[in-house]
Structures are given as structure tokens and as C-alpha cells.
Amino acid sequence: MTLVDTIFVTGTAGSGKSALTGALKKWYTDRGEEAIAVNLDPGVVATPYEPDVDVRTRVDLQDVMEKYGLGPNGALVAAADLVAARLGEIQEEIDSYSAEYVIVDTPGQTELFAFRESGEYIVKGLASDSKTLLFLLDPQLATTPGNFLSIALLSASVGLRLSLPRITVLTKRDIAGEAAKRILSWSKDSAAFEEALARTRDSDQYSLYSELFRALRRLSFGADLYPVSSATLEGLVALVGEISRLGRGGEELSD
């Protein structure tokens, strides 16, 4: 019987969820693994990969707007609930592929997927032998210590909400340059983060941000940050290795 690993790709809008979904599918299939990509975003116009299972065939955002007389934001909320209501059909289509890896590209709005009941229902309801959550950190957003900490807190919050093993991924490694190096140093070295923080925050804010960061480190939230380029595939071996460790105890990992 085929073991199924489901990988949920989450993160802020524009962080590279669809690009990483396509890169992961290519990585697995190039190595002879059976992998499929699932698009769960009913509002996406185009994806950089060909979805094997596409929620837009069942729930179309424009149709939802017209049918219920909603604007884009209201339609996204309604569409998320409609997707959850059709989870059984989505599961049947996923099962028809008999894939070893199911890579789920979640909606662009993280809060829509992570914090509404429909998102939790989908995560819990999809049948799988193991499930892993990837939270993508966009280096173009985490340009200051304060922004970095805010996104780290969001990553931790999404992980707690969905109750899944979580990996935080620093995307766009190929174009982030010095920003990526700076963010990696903050994630690994508390002193480096606090030095940078002291230059950008007053004393009251510094104390608050510093305590929050230390709490995250104590709880092992964000201690390991995986830098990846979906364009060059740099860093993908390490990321897939961690996915394998969490899902299959490190089995079947090869470069």
C-alpha cells in the first residue's frame, strides 16, 4: 500500500507558494516519485505549474461573486467554505492518482486558510499517512527585525492553529542577496537580532520585541529556517530532507 505524504504550502501573499509547489513537484517527479500538485485557491488567475487537482473546476471565484452578489473579499470567504463543503470530491480526485506526495498550494490570503474553520477542516479532513506544513517567509517583507519577528509570530500562530509539524522556509534565495543573509543570521543568533533591533526600536519596543523573540526561541519556533530558491532549486535538498524526517523518519532521501 502506498504511503501518502501531504505537504501544505502556506505563507503571506506573494511569498512564492505556487512557485515552491511547482518546484517540489518537479523535484519528486524527477526522481521517479509519484507526486501531484493541488491548487486550493479558487481566486488564482494562473499558476506556474499545471495543477493535477484544481479547485477552480468546482468553485470559481467569479461565479461566487455573481451568484451571491459579493465583492472580492466576501467572495473569497464564501469560496473557502464552499471548497470545504466539496472536500469529499477533492479527496476522490486526489486518490485517483495514487500519489506518494500530495503538495497543496493554499490560498494567497494566509488568514483565510489558517484561521477560518474551513481551513482547519480541510487540513484535518484530507486523508494522509503524514502531513507537514510549510510556512514561507518572504525576505522582501522581513527587511527589519520588527518585520522579521512579526512574520515569525505569524508562522508560529499558523502552526499552532493547524496543529501540524511546521517548517519555516525563506524563499527567493537567489534574488534576496544580503537580505537573506541578514535574516538567516537573525534566526540563528539572538545577539545579532537584538543588536539590529536596538538600532531600530526605542527602549519600550525593544524590551517587548526582545522578550517575544526569546520566547519563540525557547519554544523552538523559527529556530531552523530553510533558505530555498524555487527558480534555481538551491536549498531544496535540505528542505526535502526535513520534510522526509518529519513525515517518514528520513527514509528515501536522495540528492
Image: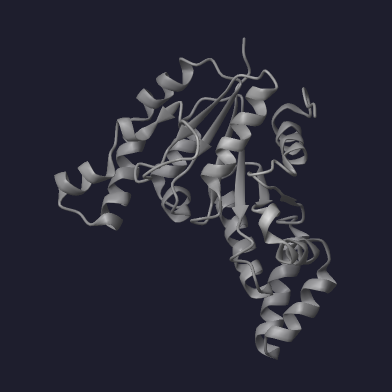
Q: Which residue is drawn at 56% across and 36% down?
A: 22
Q: Residue at x 35, y 23 (%)?
A: 89
145 and 180: which is toward the camera: 180
Residue at the top extreme, as displayed = 1
Q: In the rendering, at what x and y percent does residue 93 appear?
A: 41, 20
Quadrant including the C terminus: top right
Side of 247 where 34 appears, left or right: left
Q: In the rendering, at what x and y percent does residue 48 appear?
A: 49, 40
Q: In the rendering, at what x and y percent does residue 198 appear?
A: 75, 84
Q: What colour scheme has been applied to the protein in the rendered image?
A: one colour
Q: Residue at x 41, y 19 (%)?
A: 92
Q: In the rendering, at what x and y percent does residue 232 appear?
A: 69, 43
Q: Residue at x 80, y 26 (%)?
A: 254
147 and 116: which is toward the camera: 147
How many numbered callouts?
0
Which quadrant would residue 54 be assigned to in this image? top left
Residue at the bottom extreme, as displayed = 203
247 and 62: which is toward the camera: 62
Side of 202 where 16 appears, left or right: left
Q: In this view, does 63 lie above or below 204?
A: above
Q: Is residue 8 above or below residue 92?
A: below
Quadrant including the N terminus: top right
